[in-house]
Amino acid sequence: MYRGNFEVEDYIVERSALRHADVDGNVISLSEAEGRAPRLELTVSETALHFRSLDETINRFWIRIHADNDEHVWGGGEQMSYFDMRGRRFPLWTSEPGVGRDKTSEITFKSDLKDKAGGDYYNTNYPQPTYISSARYALHVETTAYSVFDFRRKTFHEIETWAVPERIELFAAPNFVELVEALSLRFGRQPELPDWVYKGAIIGLKDGVNSFERLEKMRNAGVQVSGLWCEDWVGLRQTSFGSRLFWDWQANDERYPDLRERIAELNGEGIRFLGYVNPYLCVDGSLFPEAEAAGYFAKDQLGRTAIVDFGEFDCGVVDFTNRQAADWFAEEVIGRRMLDFGLTGWMADFGEYLPIDVELSNGIDAKLMHNAWPTLWAEVNAKAIASRGKTGEALFFMRAGFTGVQKHCPLLWGGDQSVDFSRHDGLVTVMCAALSSGVLGNAYHHSDIGGYTSLFGNVRTPELLMRWAEMAAFTPVMRSHEGNRPRDNIQIDQDPEVLDHFARMTRIYVHLAPYLKTLSKEAAARGLPVQRPLFLHHEHDPKTYAIQDAYLYGSELLVAPVWHAAQEVRSVYLPGGADWVHVWSGVEYTGGEEVTVASPIGCPPVFYRSDAAFAETFKALKGM
Amino acid sequence: MYRGNFEVEDYIVERSALRHADVDGNVISLSEAEGRAPRLELTVSETALHFRSLDETINRFWIRIHADNDEHVWGGGEQMSYFDMRGRRFPLWTSEPGVGRDKTSEITFKSDLKDKAGGDYYNTNYPQPTYISSARYALHVETTAYSVFDFRRKTFHEIETWAVPERIELFAAPNFVELVEALSLRFGRQPELPDWVYKGAIIGLKDGVNSFERLEKMRNAGVQVSGLWCEDWVGLRQTSFGSRLFWDWQANDERYPDLRERIAELNGEGIRFLGYVNPYLCVDGSLFPEAEAAGYFAKDQLGRTAIVDFGEFDCGVVDFTNRQAADWFAEEVIGRRMLDFGLTGWMADFGEYLPIDVELSNGIDAKLMHNAWPTLWAEVNAKAIASRGKTGEALFFMRAGFTGVQKHCPLLWGGDQSVDFSRHDGLVTVMCAALSSGVLGNAYHHSDIGGYTSLFGNVRTPELLMRWAEMAAFTPVMRSHEGNRPRDNIQIDQDPEVLDHFARMTRIYVHLAPYLKTLSKEAAARGLPVQRPLFLHHEHDPKTYAIQDAYLYGSELLVAPVWHAAQEVRSVYLPGGADWVHVWSGVEYTGGEEVTVASPIGCPPVFYRSDAAFAETFKALKGM
């Protein structure tokens, strides 16, 4: 690991086929040949294959699943590059997602050189060893070990895990909707969105007290606002890389004087205040000594507090496998210093960085706990909120995830896209992320409007910012971000055209709120994601199976954001079995074909079903 | 394969440990466990382990060889990046060597993008599954299958072959010199250098008739010349990539009018003429129809002549596993059209490009013949020369190689370095190439003075050209090359300082000829390479084991070329057990320590043993 980026290499000493099976009821003992000692025991239950290793030297496991030549598979957690995973190999290991994520791009090349941070198509903050097959089944591997889904073969899928998994769970349903419902039941459903969110966008600013003025200016320009999100609420630290947050999770009076009062004022105007937190504590903060004295940190090989270098500052990792440590963080940090202080939400960052060489309180190898960490981190946040009775009201958002994060995390955020239109790290990847995580039971997804990562001279264009905003208007939550280099990149409030466009998009978002509310109820009740792949409601139209740059927003809207620069016209495949009305022109199309529509800035291709319950609401978009 | 660059990927289905051995005399049957069917038979002879597969499903083979923690290993064919291979993994597969050969360099990144041609540290035209260990043994794997030498483990070396090898040969000797002698006997020794070579440099020009004038100008400037090498003797073809040679191996009257007469004139002045040939025939040449009618080409899956695209022109591959085809090429092409025409030598290019999907006359899988190809190609050239009684007189040089090329190829050339000082593709790699191939029995090595590959704006500096020439003066053959883009790169005859320097270096080369002749006799008689690793004569000084940027030239000279830009001073380790005299200053040093000497252009660090038989010759260098 180097700052959340991993280089993974394996050396296969032996890989033995367990060809011989002795069957005793529902227990199957597997060995290399008749007469040889069984090495693996397989118990078949109604919904799963349970595995038990009979040989402690086994540390790798492979299994092949029958595949059809024309089968599609989706899932794997939150995938950024490929929604349909067939034909590729996906390591599943929570990590930084990479910059550029494309070994043929110069940005990735430079990021690899500088920080080993370029990444590749499979890197994600949120992997999950679960997939849905177009053969109408889903498969989940219950393990937190490093694992690989290999969908490159024509006749089988191969699953590899770096430990014998507990079990492989199987789900079958007559249709995709029921399959998604079943998975969301299995992994946990999120509550409905809080009512305050529907009031507009969450404005991300990290400009100290200036943030309030700038927010005011934006509101005056007609921007509908639900919250102000200031990640710098904890104060800053200056490093040679630029300003970093001060990782000691409490309000910083210097950067935000009288913050408690300011929050109350905002609340009075119907605007919530959101902050930032992550599971590390910097050694020079006030919380570190307290946590260290109590033994709450993960340890190094010598039993000392493990220190992780984040670039000119060191931190301890709170050991969430220690119940006391987790409870302390939930109560003392999130509970007292954030919720009680007045925060209604926050970015719960990181979760991907558990070093694999630390010693943990539960005694389990950190290599096995690494993937489990995001879910433990989500749970700490969720418990803190529950302790204040604010579940469904306070809103935190995470980029990291793993199996079970669904149960605790009320909102995913798509991580750190580059501020561009690139295929593997730009705007388009957010859709793939929403769809892949969505079918695994994460109902709510959103992203940094305008992207985040600006490196090597790659900066936002006004066009990008506008295209991103007009996609975000058709997602559960609109939230802006100044990016990693605010001064080098255009901000929403710096350009009248951009600001105007953004204000209009927030009005569209608010206008759609009644519809979104019904989707949110549906998510809470049935586990259906707000953003859905086209095939979810059109599974008899296989042309929809590979589409990842358009989505259904609920069942009634089809959104096909423009994700290329200077694209004034876009082609969109409209699923068969319905008629679709283009919202900006009112033109009606019969589904089952690709249509081309004008897509100037401000008019992303959006269609509604002609038979939509909310047809009048959608029709009114034309005049907005 | 894409134009000689390969992407190799494997999928291990099973890897079984054959733990159980049944011993019957010198025959050992190996199986997975007692009572199970033996899968591999191992016969132990005095010098080898012979393998026989008893299970036709076996298509991979691994074996571990005991290793000491501080062991060094050398060989692997002609390695460009690492002479001591310990700590790294070396796939052994003949291919293009790569451009930049360093995944962190921009040139490699761009070459990978453009042509998949960037390469890596292990890519080489001449791999060979043979190594010498500092534990005073050598090991050779007799197979032409793709193989890998993995020297990354502390306690063992691992050898992987993609077929059960015929045998593993073992060599032991009390010292390194005898080990190298034994290997050279095993793989075949080269004849002495032809006498004409000692007269000076072989001048590479590809400028049509202008070449003769330019040669004259160089001679007038004091350049000592042994040969004129014009690879464009066959004429040119214009493509969008620039000028390419016309691959129909005979003199082109348009580009070189009256060539036969010009060659005779040159010969009269003691200068030989050299050309170029490779094992392909272009479809629009005169030889193609003849070879096709006779069925001399490798076939595709449908039994038709396999056509290989070389970038806007197509070629057939002469099938050297067909005895008639090989004989035809040797007699009709090399014999009649080259030797009989008056050529005394040529670059025998390629050998690495046998496509792995062709059908060959001998019925063996092209994947197994791919590595064998360079040796077959060398044999065709050697036979042609032998048929004219010109062995040891006509001189061809190859970059491609494999086991056994030693027997046929009289001179290696280091392939296509970039025109720079880069660590993995510049001047320094030529030394590594000479040393690694040298200890495996290739006595003669040389390189393109000034490098060859100029891409993406990377061009020669006068300094590079001069540094390269002053290294080449201390190698068996001096040969210049205009490079792949002659017009964009400085040429020797374009700059008075460079020309002067070059002329002086050719005089130094000629001055050393009597010494070189003794080394050549030693090579022919004992198999010792002209360029030798320091440890070959100083094996009790382990500090010499990892040195790859200096070499012994015979046993009496130590050459440490400057391989960085603007390096006016260089440090050199002088082996213990001898006193060394710095040729340019006359200062004497006691071996066993690192010394630092001035190294301005024209004075590369060179030392001679104070007790050298040729001490007077070396002493005289000071005044040259």
Image (cartoon, coloured by chain):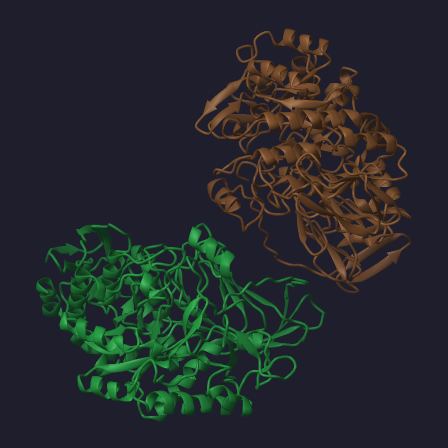
Chain colours: A brown, B green
Task: Name the foreground residue: B502 vs A282.
Answer: B502
Residue B385 in sight in this render: yes
Q: In which quarter of the view is residue A622 placed?
A: top right
- A45 displayed left or right of B272: right
Q: What number of labels is visible?
A: 0
Residue at the spot x=83%, y=29% of the render? A520
Residue at the spot x=63%, y=84% of the render? B303
**Residue B282 x %, y %:** 48, 80
**Residue B162 x %, y %:** 58, 69
Quadrant, the C terminus of chain B: bottom left
Task: Name the foreground residue: A84 vs A296.
Answer: A84
**Residue A331 x %, y %:** 69, 16
- A234 displayed left or right of A57: left
- B221 displayed left or right of A66: left
- A293 displayed left or right of B288: right
Residue A43 in the image: above or below residue A512: below
Task: Name the foreground residue: B555 vs B273.
Answer: B273
Q: In which quarter of the view is residue B236 placed?
A: bottom left
Q: In which quarter of the view is residue B427 placed?
A: bottom left
Residue B43 in sight in this render: no
**Residue A143 x %, y %:** 73, 43
